[in-house]
Amino acid sequence: MKIRWFYRLLFTFLPVFVLIISAILTTFFMVLTETAEKEAEQAAGVQARQISAAVDSLLLTIDQHATYELLSNRMFHQFLDASELGNHFLNYEVATRLKDLVVLTSMHSAYLYRQHDKTVITDSGVLALDRFSDKGFVEAAEAEVSSDGWTNPRDYPDYTGATKDRVITLVKHVPAGLGNQGMLIVNVSLNKIQTLFRELAQSNIVNYSLYDRGGKGFFGTKSAPAKDKASLYTSDITGFSVGGAFLQERSFGLITRLADNWLWIVIAIVVLGVLLFVYLIRKSTRPVDAIIDRIKTYAFKKSQLLGTGKDEFQFIESALDKLVEQSQQYEREADEGLRYKKKQFFVEVMEGSFKPEQLDWKMMFSSAGLSADYQKLALIVFEIDRFSDFIAEYNTKDQYLLKFALDNVVIECAQASGLLVWPEWINSNQLAVIAQTKPEQIESSQTVIEGWCELVRKWVEQYLKFTLTIGVGECVDVIEELPLSFESAATALKYKSTLGTNRVIGYWNLDRAESKELFDQVAKIRVIAQQYCTGNEGWEEELQAVFVNLKDNLFSKSEILNIFHYFQYCLLSRITEMSEEYNEIWKKHIQPELSAVLNRFETLQELEERLMRGLRSGAEQLESLRAKRNVLHTMTEVRDFIRERLSDPNLSLQSVSEHFGMTQSTLSRLFKNEFGEKFVDYLARMRMELAKRLLQETEKSVHEIAEEIGYNHAFSFIRVFKKLEGVTPGDYRKSDSAK
């Protein structure tokens, strides 16, 4: 009994003594820790100022270059001056200088805005503000004359308005403070700033972030709470802030208060220890009374909790029900968390950021219905065709229902084919599926997967009101190679415009994708645009030949769009040089139709039908306008006169104008208004076309050909030929023979 009482007293008072000593030592340790943390914060603040200075230096350099160009570049001032409207050579020089400025300073982009006629010039050309993709920003900057300087990060759309880059923008009003002439606007890519920032902000202790004037992170990070920031330095030049947060979680407030009041804390611990000793001694000497008091106290509280309507069993039952409800809630939350982890794991595997050693991927495979002991893996992408029509026809609820049905069809057809699959929606119109073959299917994996995809495609076509185009990726042996399979599947879908929709496109269908000649199509497009604008009926046959070539060779949708966007640009360049009546037809009829076709087509066949129909309609309107104009007949005779006398060395603007009884300036102006091409350019082009035919079809020397097309000196012919065709006549004949 004595021994038991001794140990009871020993284990009652000894822990209190140890606790008091430990609390005092812990207090002193916190004081030392706070001192070290303050020194770390000071060091972090110094580095934050250095990082801010480096970013300021980069932006200040770009600002100085922009300011220097505004002050010293005469072409910029001429462009902004309203008296220089329509000076195409000046526009070209300004665009070239803007391009040099962008390359020199590694900007993202730069453009000038002329307020007088609301015109914007970029490094690629001149266009009206209403057609400029960054119109909203220009109008906002124009309204705020005092807004010169750097903006917060923003989205900068490309010329189509579809793709947006994150940039910060420098606005310079001209003249400064008034801005009644225009603005110079310079964009700097956030990727460039992020690269510099990451090089300077490397630290194993502090995580640095760059914030704009509103406290929002530059690179998608949220503003950290003030208590988590190790430092925050704001630039006087840009207003941007550099902040740092320690990588290890710290309790600033508690440690600071403890460090400032450590003496009082020690005294409080001692007093508390004394009171605790008194309490324990009293408790040890009166154990029975303490137990009785606790029972009485509990009984009193219990009676208050139960009230008059519930007994103890009802209270216990309600407590258990609440416990079960809370447990179910926790299970639901855990299930939601698992679904999120599965989706995140799927995306990481697809993108190649997955690392097997960082996650139990076998558990993820098992939860998704796959086996960890696989033989072959492949990633397949199911894409809904004509998705714009799909979302227009069905409301959000119906869309979810149809997508849910597609999920089940994919799984059930896979079971029928002996495959294990894991489907996940990666885009609103794309369902990606990891497919896994069984050991007995290892030799026929591609055939089995292709048959399964065809089964899904036919079922959807028959029972659902939309169709699918399916991209099949390569079969791989290890999970780390699944990104290669996804890349080949995504690449296959890029060619559905050429190969067609509602079909299975495998990586094996892309053998012809590397043999196409994109430059040849671009060169033909430029000639077709010229023929179309000058009323040459051969444009239709030439354009159909281009479509035949596109069908024979495998072109992706992006390549097709690039070709026909260039065609649209060539048409615009030609027609804008013609009279206002032709421009009206272009703006109201031809251009809207072309843009609509290029934005909505799915297949090359659809593009050909709609594009040819729109162009024919436009050509009829242009031809009708030519027929109504009094000068059409005369200009047609002038054009025929030139074609018949290409071999005449005396053929010139002066001789033709004398023949038709006009002044040279009048004939030149009327010719350009009707055909969108200068007289001298047309004469040179016709002679070069004849020269190319002679080089291809005859064995005549360059000197003989020069004389035959109206050049007295072969040197002049060679110089003009190289200027227009990019090669000398001899090299052109050699390249044609090689083909």
Image (cartoon, grey):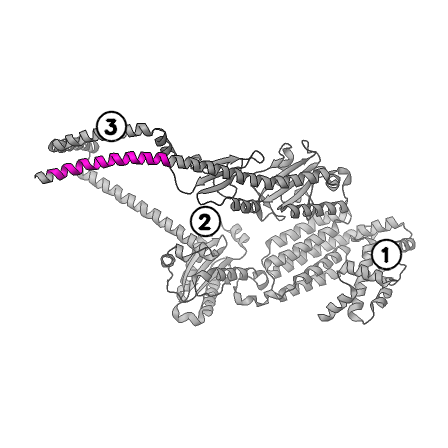
Residue at the far left in the pictured view:
1
Q: Which residues are magenta?
A: 5-32
* Residue 45, above or below 494: above
Instruction: Name the residue tied to disc 3.
Output: 271
Instruction: Specify the quadrant of the image occupied by residue 258.
Output: top left
Q: Secondary structure at mark 1?
A: helix
Q: Are marks 2 and 1 in contact (CB under 8 Å)?
A: no
SS assignment at label 3: helix
Instruction: Identify which residue is drawn at 45% across, 51% down.
Output: 400
Q: Amino acid at mark 1?
A: Val
Query: Alpha-carbon distance for marks 3 and 1?
Result: 114 Å
Task: Calculate the distance from the C-alpha at mark 2 to the C-alpha at mark 3.
Answer: 67 Å
Circle 2 residue: 397
Q: Where residue 504 sits in the image (x, y, percent)?
A: 51, 64
Instruction: Count neighbours of disc 2 (C-alpha within 10 A) and say few if under 14, some if 14 to 19, many if 20 or more.
Output: few
The image position of residue 336, as x and y in percent, is 37, 49
Circles 3, 1 touching at the beta carbon (< 8 Å): no
* Residue 638: mark in rendering: 1
Q: Quadrant of residue 415?
A: bottom left
